[in-house]
Amino acid sequence: MNPYLDQELLALSEQARRFAAARVAPGFLERDKTRVLDRDLMREMGEMGFIAPELPEQVGGLGLGCLAAGVIHEEIARADLSISYINLLASLNGQILAQHGRPEVVGPWLAKLTQGRALLAIALTEPRGGSDAANLRLRVERDGDEYVLNGEKTSISAADQADAAVVFGRTGSVESAAHGVTAVLVPMDLPGISRSRFDCHGQRAIGRGSLFFDNVRVSADHRLGEENKGFVQVMQGFDFSRALIGLQVLAVAQVALEETWDYAAQREAFGKPLTAFQGVSHPLAELATQVEAARLLCLQTLWLKDKHLPHSAQAAMCKWWAPKLAYDVVHQCLLVFGHGGYDRGVMEQRLRDVLGFQIGDGTAQIMKTIIARAKAGRQAVPA
Ligand SMILES: Cc1cc2nc3c(=O)[nH]c(=O)nc-3n(C[C@H](O)[C@H](O)[C@H](O)COP(=O)(O)OP(=O)(O)OC[C@H]3O[C@@H](n4cnc5c(N)ncnc54)[C@H](O)[C@@H]3O)c2cc1C
């Protein structure tokens, strides 16, 4: 029983689990080597209605709630965290486009996004730093009915595989900070764009890299939200992705725990199953408790979002807690497997995959500052 999931959501979750076990899990280890997202698989996910189902039907979604997006997301992540990036990026960018874009411009992109025929990146971080996110340098200058982009975005997930990116840049002066930032939808095949790929520790099928903009001209109707209001308006979408990331990494932790309980129950040492030793079973029991609690927090956050209630502090709680917890869980599970856990394989890949989210989408320190501001007031918690 779960207070946030009714029969319909449980059935959807079961459907996604069967699909992920049959279609996503088999390529998990191989994609880490090839470092390529499987576009056929992405289209299949779109055909199943698994990509951004929370978007309204008129823009290609199914009009289901954010909880529906969450339960699908965790089942895909259970099988391969990198593949579940397709869901994460589509839900984050889909919401931004649907809420802030001109229908005639974003409509075709939203259709392709939900059908699994387009992948969109989100480009905020710059070489000078990501935590101080409003302090952007990439220039976005108006020239007639176009914007001209110059600068670099770095550490962008799917940088070299994305078909378009939501790019945040500076239209105002540097001193204007968050109030001089504008968001623009930029197709990646425009002249003047080049890209690079990093050699990442984990999440290798999705990958990260830099985007370079050299006098890139984008039609002004591709702006998302108002000019100079990109940070304030468009960044609100991140509360959604933070709850989704929580479910994403906890799904990896959950499957690692399930496999570890099974292994520890059948593996013997000193004439007994490993589970007979409290040194093995109690840490797993403690972590299982925390995973259950953290998952409830993530589901509650999505429930609050579906009810249009404030949830920024809860989203930040999901984002700092779940990735740290998931890392601790997979680490502990790996140790229970003994020397076998240290081999290249499923468990060590999971450890590499979940670690990235202790940094990506904002670090634990920044999340705790968001929570502190919500509790004590912004004046009491200056940057
Ligand atoms: C797997 C992964 C995926 C990513 N995907 C994307 C993406 O798709 N798009 C995108 O735009 N970016 C992405 N990023 C970048 C990510 O958002 C940034 O790395 C992150 O915001 C931190 O910025 P930074 O790395 O520049 O660290 P810095 O901002 O330089 O911070 C360095 C350290 O100092 C700490 N710190 C900084 N300021 C404070 C403070 N005020 N108080 C306390 N501690 C502080 C930070 O917590 C951190 O530990 C991704 C990163 C990773 C690892």
Image: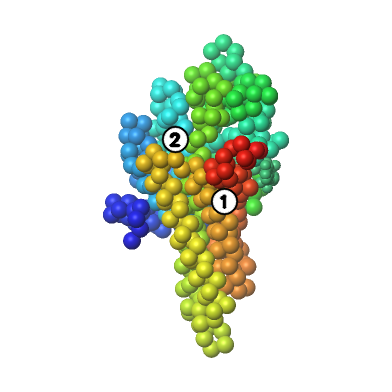
- Location of residue 47 by image quarter: top left
Q: Position of residue 127 (x, y in %)?
A: 70, 36
Residue under pointer 2: 94
The amino acid pointed to by label 1 is Trp
Q: Residue at x 54, y 27 (%)?
A: 230
C-alpha distance separating marks 2 and 1:
24 Å
Q: Amino acid at mark 2?
A: Gly
Residue 120 position within the rendered picture, expressed as x and y whole percent measured from the top left: 50, 35
Q: Is residue 139 visible?
A: no
- Quadrant where the C terminus sits is top right
Residue 265: x and y in percent read 48, 78
Q: Is residue 275 left or right of residue 369?
A: left
User: Does label 1 point to a residue whose CB lies under 8 Å from ligand 1?
Assistant: no
Which quadrant is the N terminus positioned in? bottom left
Location of ligand 1 given as a quarter of the image: top right
Say the numbered circle drawn on residue 134. none
Q: Nearer the viewer, residue 99 or 205?
A: 99
Q: Which residue lies at the image location 59% right of the left edge and 47% below the top edge?
A: 368
Q: Residues within 10 Å of mark 1 (few under 14, many from 20)?
A: many
Task: Report the number of discs.
Answer: 2
Mark 1 and mark 2 in contact (Cβ < 8 Å)? no
> Mark 2 packing: few (<14 Cα in 10 Å), some, or many (20+)?
many
Q: Residue at x 60, y 13 (%)?
A: 143
Instruction: Identify the residue position indicated by label 1 in the image.
Output: 320
Is 331 situated above or below 281?
A: above
Report if residue 144 is visible in the image: yes
* Quarter-of-image position of residue 270: bottom right
Q: Is residue 43 above or below residue 330?
A: above
Query: Percent from the top left, x then y, of residue 378?
Result: 59, 37
Image height of 46 relative to 224, above or below: below
* Left or right side of 358 for 247: left
